[in-house]
Amino acid sequence: NFVTSRLAGFHKLSMEERRAQIAQMFRLSPEEMDLLSGHGSLQTTLANQMIENAVGTFSLPLGLGLNMMVNGREYLVPMAVEEPSVVAAVSFAAKIVREAGGFTAEADDSMMIGQVQLTRYGDPTEATQKILAHKEHLLALANSFHPSMIRRGGGAKDVEVRVLPAPEGPRGEPLLIVHLLVDTQEAMGANLINTMAEGVTPLLEQITGGKVYLRILSNLADRRLARATCRIPTSALADFDLPGELIAEGISQASRFAQADPYRAATHNKGVMNGIDAVAIATGQDWRAIEAGAHAFACRDGQYRPLSTWHLEEGHLVGRIELPMALGLVGGPIKVHPGVQVALKLMQAHTVREMSMVFAAVGLAQNFAAVRALGSVGIQKGHMAMHARCVAVTAGARGDWVEKIANELVKVGHVKVEKAREIIAALPP
Ligand code: NDP
């Protein structure tokens, strides 16, 4: 069955028509269709097993990001998000990039870091030497807690020791942090790393005579990065009655601004994460972990920087993104939440590595759409048109009236709830 992410006119279809098209393309069963539309996608009995004090479930709109092409492959991108314009922006950006050859992406092995904090160890150099001398023993012990990870080609691979200055000054004991590097394969890996980190504690205490306190993974997953790039001829960027060169210049200025200024970089990265979080939520990922990793990575040289950059190169606009991507295709809620299974079926990324590359490309596409508008005509025009629908609903409009009232709000240039109420009040009964 041919799957394409290029679904021309998809946004103009009714929701029923969109579902029918997707059902046909992916040969979805009636049960899967029910899950896609949100009916029973998470039963309350299951919700009650997932978290504590459950009283129900919570829904978000699920949309499909279109036109995405990464390393020559088509991807439909399931996105769960409440913010208008996110899905449209990613689809629009992916279309421009696709016409320029698509995104090129790569991702590291699933190497995660488990941290163990050792105290009262004596001399830091001696303690470090003792730990490293027992590296093989520590790795074997860590792997004994998850023998199947070795069979999968993963498991604990290396031990590193970091000695950090005491926060209270030179009189305090330097911090001695042991890093256990674990290849978590198709899992995000938090639970399995935590088990290993706790598991090696008695041996570390025995080797050094010290006392261990914290044992947990690091969300700064900087050994597990995903990268995406795109290269767009500047002539392909012409829009808003502006030449492509001017739009490209605006985008590269946006990149310079974010590189130099953390106040701007925070908003730049918020835009990147608009896309990544939406696909993370739809596919059952721990998006707090992805967020924490992304922002910590953005600070790696001491200043908060943009996760993506844009520059001009021989008549082309070149975009790059690099960020930690701790994803899973097993573990956590992934096999438990039936709606997640359908979302993953639509995305058709068969490995965590492949999925990480799509996530990185989504982040870059989302950022492209934002800086393209910001560096030229501004985002409010496009945003307000979509925001107007939300305002119309807030004012009480329903059904076909939502679109009509929203259009009227945009036409009068006053996208406010009281204006919408005024328009509704003036309607014939
Ligand atoms: P799980 O422990 O639920 O699942 C991972 C397990 O799946 C592995 O240990 C392995 O068990 C099994 N598995 C089966 N097939 C594979 C495969 N191909 N590759 C790898 N493992 C496989 O989840 P994670 O360890 O991934 O932890 C993720 C969860 O931890 C998330 O829900 C997250 O929210 C949560 N969490 C996050 C924290 C953080 O980010 N700071 C902290 C604590 C928890 P086996 O080897 O036994 O077969």
Image: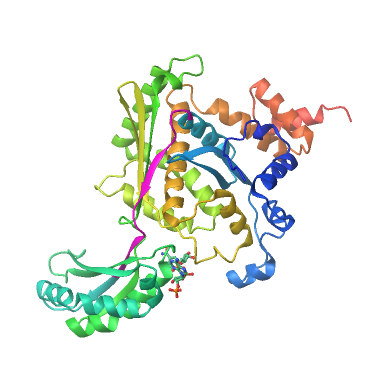
Q: Quadrant of residue 166?
A: bottom left
Q: Residue at x 17, y 69 (%)?
A: 174
* Residue 85 appears left or right of 127: right
Screen quadrant of the C terminus: top right
Q: Is residue 108 magenta?
A: yes
Colour convention: rainbow
User: Residue 26's spot in the image, x, y percent?
Assistant: 64, 48
Q: Is residue 140 visible?
A: yes
The magenta-colored residue range is 99-115
Relative placement, left or right, of 343 versus 302 is: right
Ligand 1: image quarter? bottom left
Check the image and report above or below for 364 versus 351: above
Rendering coords of residue 57 (x, y %): 66, 61
Q: Residue at x 12, y 74 (%)?
A: 129
Residue 307 seen anywhere in this rendered image of the structure: no
Give the side of residue 315 with respect to residue 62, left or right: left
The mark tally for this picture is 0
The image shows residue 139, relative to residue 109, as above or below, that is below
Tell me where residue 70 appears, x and y as whole percent.
45, 41
- Left or right: residue 375 compared with residue 209: right
Compared with 249, 130 (above or below) is: below
Q: Residue at x 20, y 75 (%)?
A: 135
To which quarter of the image does residue 409 belong?
Answer: top right
Q: Is residue 249 or residue 413 the one in the foreground?
A: 249
Q: Within the magenta stretch, is there residue 255?
A: no
Given the current orientation, which residue lies at the most extreme front position?
A: 1
| Residue at figure coordinates x 71%, y 55% from the top left | 29
